[in-house]
Amino acid sequence: MPDRLSAVDVSFLYLEDETTPMHVGEMLVFQAPDSGFDYDRLVTLIRRRIAFVPRYRQRVRWVPGRLANPVWVDDQDFDVAFHVRRSALPSPGTDGQLRELAARIMSRPLDPTRPLWEVYLVEALQGGRFAILTKTHQSMVDGTAAVDIGQVILDPTPDPRPTPDVHWNPSQEPSGAELVAGAVVDSVRRPAVVVDNARKGLADVSDAATGLLRQAGGLVSALWTAARPPAESPLNVPIGAQRRFGTATADLEDFKRIRREHGGTINDVVLAVIAGALRAWLMTRQENVGSRHTIRAMVPVSVQDIGQRTPANRVAAFLVDLPTGEQDPVVRLNRISFEMAQHKDGGHMVGAQSLVALTGFTPPTLHAMGARLGADLSRRVANVVITNVPGPQQPLYVAGAQLLAAYPILPLVKSMAVSIGLTSYNGGVYFGLNADRDAMDDIDVLTACISEAIDELLDTTRKSRTRAKRTRKD
């Protein structure tokens, strides 16, 4: 029987509409090798390596009557050339033109009748560079455990690793009657799954109750934060179908220096930088930023149980109130570090895992309403989504071309005007800001504020050193 989509995966299909396509992407910028790089080379590479990600040759097949979640079936007419596309900028193409092209490409939904991914080769960038844009539906990539097509084509050396030719024959697609029969079988088995989820949920609740006694109400604090609506913000407006894309680049060493000087984690420094950037951006819009002003961020964090033998890539979503009303950048960082530490020490993730387990109770036919309610809930409890994914700290290559930069592109949640993702790679930190075109016509102002917020925190480390030198002289 074909693999069935999980409750979480299928929710991304239900969430999708004309203003909120549910695909993630990445804008990868490369330096072309002396031998050059062209479309045929990219197609050949993907055709060889797609065997490592068989899901990319499968499409979604719905069960008649929506009696169960849909399944993955091999695409009988799979055509790699349909998914790998070619584009070019007027030579020499600028970074601004590349961002505009990325925004237009990411605005368009994927074809639901085919495997849910696309790759674009963008040629003629100035400086002998080119770009690869990846676009993959979230139902295919869970963010931590699955492998994206962009990762498969990258190598740690300029010489591509050998990849044998593998002949692929698609499996016979099940008939409608077979899909219905499989749904009936799963429904017979479902009571055991429900009982198991309930048992797991009760165990989590028991653990949480014990933790509450030891940790003075940490979980209650998390629920209280979620219950309080975030402050009104220009980040929360009705959104349209078109996008803008902004980027910012920084040195990872600068973040490490700030952390060494003031404590916390790299992720704390990232959030403090974004808090400072949002504060400055709001002030350019003449928004009232009082001393108690905050922007609530939903911050997904990958978590794995200590001592677990097999990878358990799960994501806990923390709610963090960024102190945008605080003028002192060091105080902003300290407040964020304290709040993140409270989240991690308070066992808040336990409650989130119980909720994930309970999603198994929802009949597939109710997922549409449940998923849309989830989107509505997210905009009621947060102003912005921020993701931070650490990447490899050594150069990567595609067919001899060195990867220079990697900017993530996250989907927008309904009524959120911008999503912020960042990736660290080879000593750099790369911010990607996907934004609604009408609501965020000043996205370049916000990206400039990110660079200014980093400099603001770096200045505090220089002042600390100056004070220390003066103290030693005295």
Image: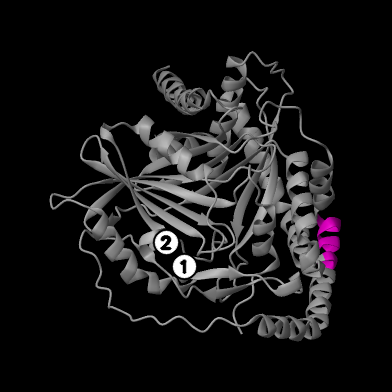
Q: How is the image coloured?
A: one colour
- Magenta residues span 205-214
Residue hosting label 2 = 149
Tell me the quarter of the image containing the N terminus.
Answer: bottom right
Q: Is disc 1 placed on a helix, strand or loop?
A: helix
Residue placed most toward the observer, 152 or 83:
83
Quadrant location of residue 81?
Answer: bottom left
Q: Amino acid at mark 1?
A: Tyr
Q: Amino acid at mark 2?
A: Ile
Q: Position of residue 260 (x, y in %)?
A: 47, 39
Residue hosting label 1 = 56
Whether the residues at callouts 2 and 1 have beta carbons within 8 Å, the answer is yes
Q: Circle 2: is it few (<14), some (14-19), or many (20+) Cα within 10 Å? A: many
Q: Position of residue 402 (x, y in %)?
A: 25, 50
What main secondary structure does the magenta stretch of the protein show? helix
> In the figure, 277 relative to 21: above or below?
above
The numbered mark at residue 307 is none
